[in-house]
Amino acid sequence: MADLRIDLAGIKSPNPFWLASAPPTNSGYQVQRAFEAGWGGAVWKTLGEPILNVSSRFAAVNFNGQRVAGFNNIELITDRPLEVNLQEIYETKKRFPNHAIIVSLMVEPKQEKWHEIVKKVEAVGVDGLELNFGCPHGMAERGMGAASGQVPDLVEKQTFWVKEVAQTPVIVKLTPNITDITMTAEAAARGGADAISMINTINSLAGVDLDSWNTVPHVGGKGAHGGYCGPAVKPIALNMVAECARNPLFNVPISGIGGISNWQDAAEFILMGATGVQVCTAAMHHGFSIVEDMIDGLNNYLDDKGIASVMDLVGRSVSRYSDWGDLDLNYKVVAEINNDVCINCNKCHIACEDTSHQCIDLYTESGRPMLKVREQDCVGCNLCSIVCPVDGAISMVERKSSIAPMTWNERQSLISNFAK
Amino acid sequence: MVPIQENAMTAQLKRNFVEMNSRMTKNEAIEEANRCLYCYDAPCITACPTSIPIPNFIKKIASSNMKGSAMTIMDANPIGASCARVCPTEELCEGACVLNASTKPIKIGHLQRYATDWAIESSVELFKKGQTNGQKVAIVGSGPAGLSAARELSRFGYDVTIFEAEAKAGGLGSYGIVSFRLPNEVVDWEVEQIVKLGVDIKTNTTVGVDISADEILAQYDRVILAIGMGAVPNLGIEGEELNGVHDAIEFVKNTKIGTLTEDLVGKRVVVIGAGNTAIDGATCAKRLGAEQVDILYRRTEKEMTAYQFEYEFAKQDGVAFKWLTAPTKIIGDEAGKVVALECIKMKLGEAGADGRQRPEEVEGSEFVMEVDAVIKAIGQTRFVSLIEAFGLQHTNGVVDIDETTMQTSNKKVFACGDVVFGNGQGEAMVVTAAQQGKDAAYIIHEQLKKTSEIA
């Protein structure tokens, strides 16, 4: 049994799987059910001035028959009175003292407002705070959420105000609706954030109904942009986590969020620098019990790798993530087709022929259709192996180069040296 | 060049007994696993006699947590690798799958095999013996029920001894289920898992010969009787002693041990009875090279007790069915070898006490079939003397039990599996036997835990 306990900026939880601030963490009833199912922590759905919600709130994007490849919502922060939430947080923490309860907060960008809510929330006994600078809809129109999260100065200033009074660790949750997330991450760090979490949802419109011409979802015939999450956003989130993790100006722990559906996704975020992960869409799709395989799978993975603690996995791939200019121009892979495994769908051929480098030939041998890669023309783009539907039919294999490794940056500096 | 032909024939027969269903490829398994809806309160779990958390093990295949998947299966069912192959899944989990109502059910049996095959091949350790509590349990019989009880008791910390009359442990799995459905390696692995938990399996040990029932009762804190059923009873007609008359159970057993004989190549074989064992006998005969195999049944297709999929399978194997036909006499030649079977046509009459229409002979409809072998598959006898040696109450060889506790008339003795199946009590499936074995283990643990707590 590997040790799955994590310590994120002083917040301890029995495993790295937290529920993200969202509909699943709306009430004490839900959070307690989640802890019973095995979740290590929960970020309570954002507290602030209670708001009004609309009816018809979620929409999903299905892909080729698979439901919920992506998920879109226009639900806002909590619509329940602050006192009710605080009472339930208190009761939940009392019942589950070893689980992490972090409370998400969002108020107007005013010092006294932040001081007031931080004190009230910490008074009931919580393990940490998460500042919601990411909600992309509704609250942003009122100058909160993503509206303040898109302005580095506002992120820094509000984080600072919170840190003036906070006794517990402060996590700043960042919006991805920005050109370079490291700018706001750095601002949060300057403001004194103990950790950052990312990503919040991405501005989205799930679809348009081709019969009614209404947006999906719509509220009485009218729609507004929502926030996109679920499996489809994982690569975007993973990159943002990795960019922050490898940023030398920035040195606070990261809580990874964005399309994490199973232990494998979680392990990828952890390898890329997240100390723990937060999950929402997968739980909304399947219920809290999915955490059982997350815990079991991660534990078996760590045991297989001979890693005693999940904390030893954090960031192990960060040094392998770099800039394009640091990649070896002389490294070469080529596609290799195993005709014994190939089922002759010819998708590799047409993908290469029409859209890549025209290097996969069709031919017949003793009447049998075959495919072969002309290695001298193959650029190692991977496309054929991506479209191939059969495991083991196409492998990308390394071809040792006779030329020494050289990156673009090294090449450019050599050229400029010659020019001197 | 006779020897070469013989070799080719031997090779052909061997191929006929290789497992028929192929394993899912990884692609297939992942695709199918991702099709599972992961229902809440899933009906497939309810339909499984051992309550395997099916959506969980399938989700773990989807996430490539293969060890977790195998653990989930084997934790709920100690013979989960066998059940993946022999369960009538369309009557159980797959029959209950909610997707029957919209698309097509998840191939649960195949996925279960995919996960347990992984465990077999990776030789990973799944379970550990519990801390020894010093209490001893004897189990008579190492079939599905006995093995399941042993596995659970060992995990609780009991010292478990199994007494097995045969040379190999596994019971029905090792001797009774045709190899082309359940290869020996699968059962061998399940037995090995249980031996690794410290269970002492004494094979070649017949209770009543090598050790008496009284000795077992005296030496162990609790006893579980999981002895299954015995040979096929006599037909009660002339000629049963002839050379070429087989007991279906023995007949199948011979295909599982030792080499496959070529005695039936090109021959005509008749199987009497139309249950699942009759189908096994018939399909084995066909795969041993018999030219013509007929199943004789005194009732009709409607009344036959074989599963529908077994019936379809037999037809695909080329087995013919003669309904409303009963044997009256087996005819032999001077050397005492079967040459023909005299039969009579039947019709269905009034319903009997069991509610089924009783078959009646059609006067003057006798006819003779030329046959080379007759396989009897009209049910199984009971090990009555062994049951009585333990002093247990029984009804026609079916041990009387309290169905909630699996306890027999001797409170120290529990019974499970086929030995309690019959007269409207229990179920004959392998998976039910496995669950009964678990149940017996849990109740023994409940009782002994209490006594040790009091002490």
Image (tube, coloured by chain):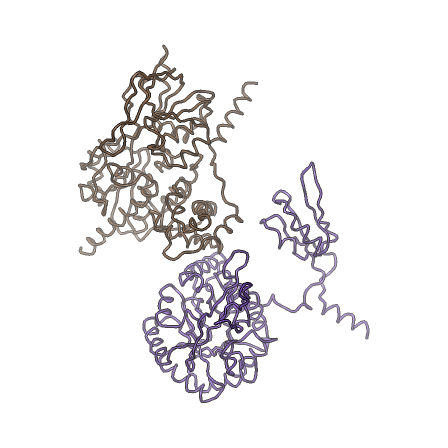
Q: Quadrant of the N terminus of chain B?
A: top right
Q: Relative to residue A187, is residue A371 drawn left or right?
A: right
Q: Relative to residue A318, is residue A379 drawn left or right?
A: right
Q: Residue furthest top?
A: B334
Q: Residue at x 31, y 23 (%)?
A: B346
Q: Relative to residue A337, is residue A14 drawn left or right?
A: left
Colour for chain A in the figure: purple
Q: Residue at x 41, y 62 (%)?
A: A287
Q: Residue at x 57, y 82 (%)?
A: A152
Task: Say if A249 sits above or below B87 in the image.
Answer: below
Q: Residue furthest bottom?
A: A112
Front in this rendered view, residue A83 or B68? A83
Q: Relative to residue B401, is residue A315 drawn left or right?
A: right
Q: Residue at x 37, y 19 (%)?
A: B244
Whole-percent x and y of residue B74? Answer: 38, 49
Residue A198 visible (yes or no): no
User: Judging from the image, what is the letter of the chain drawn in brown?
Assistant: B
Whole-percent x and y of residue B209? Answer: 25, 30
Whole-percent x and y of residue B182? Answer: 42, 37
Task: Say if A96 sits above or below B363 in the image.
Answer: below
Q: Quadrant of the C terminus of chain B?
A: bottom left
Whole-percent x and y of residue B111? Answer: 45, 47
Task: Say if B235 sits above or below A290 in the image.
Answer: above
Residue B10 visible (yes or no): yes
Task: Say if B387 sits above or below A266 in the image.
Answer: above
Name the image quarter holding residue B91.
top left
Q: Residue furthest front?
A: A212
Front in this rendered view, residue B358 or A293? B358
Tally the numbered discs: 0
